[in-house]
Amino acid sequence: MFTRLLFTLCFLLISLMVITSCEYEVIEFDQPDPTVEIKFSNDILPIFNKGCNVAGCHSAGHVVVDLTAANAYKDLFAKNMIDTEFPEQSKLYAKLVAAGSTHTGRSTPTELETILLWIRQGAKNN
Protein backbone atom coordinates (compact mmCIF):
# COMPACT_ATOMS: atom_id res chain seq x y z
CA MET A 1 0.00 0.00 0.00
CA PHE A 2 2.80 2.39 0.93
CA THR A 3 4.64 1.58 -2.33
CA ARG A 4 1.56 2.36 -4.38
CA LEU A 5 1.07 5.69 -2.57
CA LEU A 6 4.72 6.57 -3.03
CA PHE A 7 4.54 5.71 -6.73
CA THR A 8 1.41 7.85 -7.19
CA LEU A 9 2.99 10.81 -5.40
CA CYS A 10 6.17 10.52 -7.46
CA PHE A 11 4.12 10.29 -10.66
CA LEU A 12 2.10 13.38 -9.72
CA LEU A 13 5.22 15.31 -8.76
CA ILE A 14 7.00 14.45 -12.02
CA SER A 15 3.86 15.28 -14.03
CA LEU A 16 3.58 18.62 -12.30
CA MET A 17 7.24 19.39 -13.00
CA VAL A 18 6.84 18.53 -16.68
CA ILE A 19 3.67 20.56 -17.11
CA THR A 20 5.03 23.64 -15.37
CA SER A 21 8.33 23.50 -17.22
CA CYS A 22 6.72 23.70 -20.66
CA GLU A 23 7.16 26.96 -22.48
CA TYR A 24 6.28 28.16 -25.90
CA GLU A 25 8.71 30.10 -27.98
CA VAL A 26 7.39 32.65 -30.40
CA ILE A 27 9.52 32.58 -33.49
CA GLU A 28 9.95 35.98 -34.99
CA PHE A 29 11.50 36.60 -38.36
CA ASP A 30 13.45 39.52 -39.67
CA GLN A 31 11.25 41.89 -41.59
CA PRO A 32 13.11 43.56 -44.43
CA ASP A 33 13.41 47.30 -43.92
CA PRO A 34 10.93 48.91 -46.36
CA THR A 35 13.11 52.02 -46.59
CA VAL A 36 16.05 50.02 -47.98
CA GLU A 37 16.00 49.22 -51.68
CA ILE A 38 15.85 45.49 -52.39
CA LYS A 39 18.35 44.56 -55.08
CA PHE A 40 17.56 41.76 -57.50
CA SER A 41 21.19 40.65 -57.79
CA ASN A 42 22.00 40.78 -54.06
CA ASP A 43 18.69 39.93 -52.39
CA ILE A 44 16.42 38.04 -54.82
CA LEU A 45 18.80 35.88 -56.86
CA PRO A 46 20.32 34.28 -53.73
CA ILE A 47 16.83 33.12 -52.73
CA PHE A 48 16.44 31.42 -56.10
CA ASN A 49 19.99 30.04 -56.01
CA LYS A 50 19.54 28.31 -52.65
CA GLY A 51 17.23 25.72 -54.10
CA CYS A 52 15.13 26.74 -57.08
CA ASN A 53 17.71 26.08 -59.75
CA VAL A 54 20.26 24.06 -57.76
CA ALA A 55 18.30 20.82 -58.12
CA GLY A 56 17.60 21.59 -61.77
CA CYS A 57 13.92 22.40 -61.26
CA HIS A 58 14.21 25.93 -62.62
CA SER A 59 17.38 25.69 -64.67
CA ALA A 60 17.64 26.69 -68.31
CA GLY A 61 15.29 24.72 -70.55
CA HIS A 62 13.97 22.53 -67.73
CA VAL A 63 10.78 24.17 -66.42
CA VAL A 64 8.46 27.03 -67.33
CA VAL A 65 10.47 29.72 -65.50
CA ASP A 66 14.26 29.74 -65.77
CA LEU A 67 15.59 31.12 -62.46
CA THR A 68 19.28 30.90 -63.26
CA ALA A 69 21.25 34.12 -62.68
CA ALA A 70 21.60 34.76 -66.42
CA ASN A 71 17.90 34.41 -67.21
CA ALA A 72 15.78 34.88 -64.08
CA TYR A 73 14.85 38.54 -64.39
CA LYS A 74 14.02 38.36 -68.10
CA ASP A 75 12.06 35.13 -67.71
CA LEU A 76 10.03 36.34 -64.71
CA PHE A 77 8.71 39.21 -66.81
CA ALA A 78 8.43 37.24 -70.06
CA LYS A 79 6.20 34.70 -68.25
CA ASN A 80 4.14 37.45 -66.52
CA MET A 81 5.18 36.29 -63.06
CA ILE A 82 5.50 39.85 -61.69
CA ASP A 83 2.67 42.34 -61.15
CA THR A 84 4.03 45.60 -59.75
CA GLU A 85 0.55 47.15 -59.66
CA PHE A 86 -0.81 44.39 -57.40
CA PRO A 87 2.30 42.79 -55.83
CA GLU A 88 0.43 40.26 -53.67
CA GLN A 89 -1.22 38.94 -56.84
CA SER A 90 2.08 38.38 -58.65
CA LYS A 91 2.25 34.79 -59.83
CA LEU A 92 5.72 34.45 -58.32
CA TYR A 93 4.58 35.49 -54.85
CA ALA A 94 1.24 33.69 -55.05
CA LYS A 95 2.94 30.44 -56.02
CA LEU A 96 5.21 30.64 -52.98
CA VAL A 97 2.44 31.29 -50.45
CA ALA A 98 -0.53 29.34 -51.87
CA ALA A 99 -1.80 26.59 -49.59
CA GLY A 100 -1.11 23.21 -51.10
CA SER A 101 1.35 24.53 -53.68
CA THR A 102 4.48 22.48 -54.29
CA HIS A 103 6.43 25.66 -53.49
CA THR A 104 4.81 26.42 -50.13
CA GLY A 105 7.32 26.24 -47.30
CA ARG A 106 10.37 26.35 -49.53
CA SER A 107 11.09 29.97 -48.63
CA THR A 108 11.42 31.45 -45.18
CA PRO A 109 9.04 34.19 -44.03
CA THR A 110 11.90 36.68 -44.39
CA GLU A 111 12.55 35.57 -47.97
CA LEU A 112 8.85 35.84 -48.82
CA GLU A 113 8.69 39.36 -47.40
CA THR A 114 11.86 40.29 -49.30
CA ILE A 115 10.37 39.09 -52.58
CA LEU A 116 7.11 40.93 -51.92
CA LEU A 117 8.95 44.12 -50.96
CA TRP A 118 11.08 43.90 -54.13
CA ILE A 119 7.91 43.65 -56.23
CA ARG A 120 6.33 46.57 -54.30
CA GLN A 121 9.44 48.64 -55.00
CA GLY A 122 8.96 48.13 -58.74
CA ALA A 123 10.81 44.82 -59.27
CA LYS A 124 13.91 46.52 -60.61
CA ASN A 125 16.74 44.68 -62.32
CA ASN A 126 19.44 46.06 -60.07
Image (cartoon, rainbow, N blue to C red):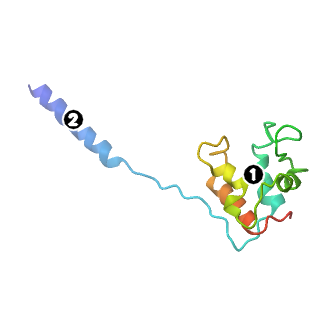
Quadrant of the image containing the C terminus: bottom right
Q: Residue at x 48, y 56 (%)?
A: 26
Marks 2 and 1 sit apart, C-alpha to C-alpha, by: 52 Å
Q: Which mark is residue 10?
A: 2
Mark 2 residue type: Cys
Quadrant where the N terminus is found in the figure: top left
Q: Position of residue 80 (x, y in %)?
A: 80, 55
Is label 2 in contact with label 1 (beta carbons under 8 Å)? no
Residue under label 1: 47
Which residue sits at x=81%, y=37%? 56
| Label 2: few (<14), some (14–19) or many (≥20) C-alpha neighbours in 10 Å | few
Viewer-nearest residue: 82 or 43: 82
Q: Residue furthest right?
A: 70
Q: Quadrant of residue 59?
A: top right
In the image, 20: left or right of 7? right
Q: Nearer the viewer, residue 89 or 11?
A: 89
